[in-house]
Amino acid sequence: MGLNLHCHLEGCVRPATAADIAREHGLPEPAGGWEAALRMREPADLTVFLAHVAAAYPVMGFAGSLRRIARESVEDAAATGDAFLEIRFGPATHRRPDLSIDAIIVAVRDGLAEGSAATGLPTGLVVCLLRHSDPDTNLEVARAAAAHAGNGVVGLDVAGDELLWPANEAYVEPYRIAAAAGLGLTAHAAEASGAGAAREAAEWLGATRIGHGTHVADDPEVLAWAVDHDLTFEVCATSNVYTGAARSLREHPVHAFLAAGAGVVLGNDNPITIDRSLADEEGDLVASGGLLPDQLDGIDRRAVAVGFMDEGVRSALRVRFG
Ligand SMILES: [Zn+2]
């Protein structure tokens, strides 16, 4: 139904597709099979969550596989009613001696375009720097993303372990390159680090959207600053429950964000990992999370305003969502 502005390709690999790709390339099946490797059965912690996401990495080191996984991510989102889909991923994870960062981005970009053409679902690709990558790799990723700006790539993000690699100044130059190319800027921040990391991402990197930002809800001063500066929080509530970052949908920081007047948009983060479509996410937030339907309408309108989409797509979505 709504706009999905936070969805990782690595969490979109269908178990059956992983099995196909593994067979094709002679990769071993995980103990317990692909279904158990890729999906969580119940909430746990971030370590367990990330292990399920990382289980897909071995099948993502091939251009043809990336293209298929990207196409299928669009098919799955279209089948469950998404109106717009931003897919993000970290190309450096999938680099191989015979597969360059640029070729990886092109494969995913082309897969998304195929999915869009087949389903009519408009999409955009957000390229992620990774906190554990070395500076040269992050610069290479930013330059490759910038080279495809306006041609499928719509934004830059930084993802990865904030506790081990908290220094946001390391990403100033890659974000400058992306901004100069006209890419939208978002950043995972204040998910594991404290609230101040979200302010750093905005002030130092130019991010206008913050992935998760859960800890900003703990700090009224930074939350007020975020409202004043019109930041948007990309909320993936079920994912936060599965990682243990939130106790429940009802106790999720999204309520503090909305009460403070902060901008909120939604995503499902890793749909295969947590077995949730965006429509599930929206339905659960209203049915068990205490979100009011008119708050959901406001979230959709915000997503139309801040999505990294071309103006033709934005105009069409504005007609639909008001
Ligand atoms: Zn994320």
Image: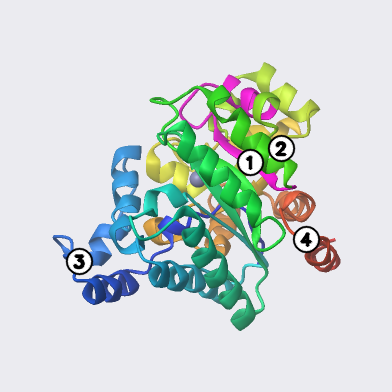
Per the model, the C-alpha gap separating discs 2 and 1 is 6 Å
Note whether residue 130 is visible.
Answer: no
In what quadrant of the picture does the C terminus appear? bottom right
Q: Amino acid at mark 2?
A: Thr
Q: Amino acid at mark 3?
A: Leu
The reply to whether callout 3 and callout 2 are in contact (CB within 8 Å) is no
Secondary-structure class at tag 1 = strand
Residue 147's spot in the image, x, y percent? 64, 53
- Residue tagged by mark 3? 27
- Residue tagged by mark 4? 310
Per the model, the C-alpha gap separating discs 3 and 2 is 40 Å
Residue 44's spot in the image, x, y percent? 31, 42
Q: Residues within 10 Å of mark 3 (few under 14, many from 20)?
A: some
- Residue tagged by mark 1? 186
Task: Between label 3 and label 1, give the one nearer the viewer.
Answer: 3
Question: How many numbered discs?
Answer: 4
Residue 172 or residue 267, whichever sits in front: 172
Task: Using residue 11 as the reference point, say whether residue 86 is left or right of it.
Answer: right
The reply to whether callout 2 and callout 1 are in contact (CB within 8 Å) is yes
Q: Residue at x 28, y 43 (%)?
A: 48
Task: Using residue 66 as the reference point, say whether residue 114 is left or right of it.
Answer: right
Per the model, the C-alpha gap separating discs 2 and 4 is 17 Å
Q: Residue at x 41, y 33 (%)?
A: 161
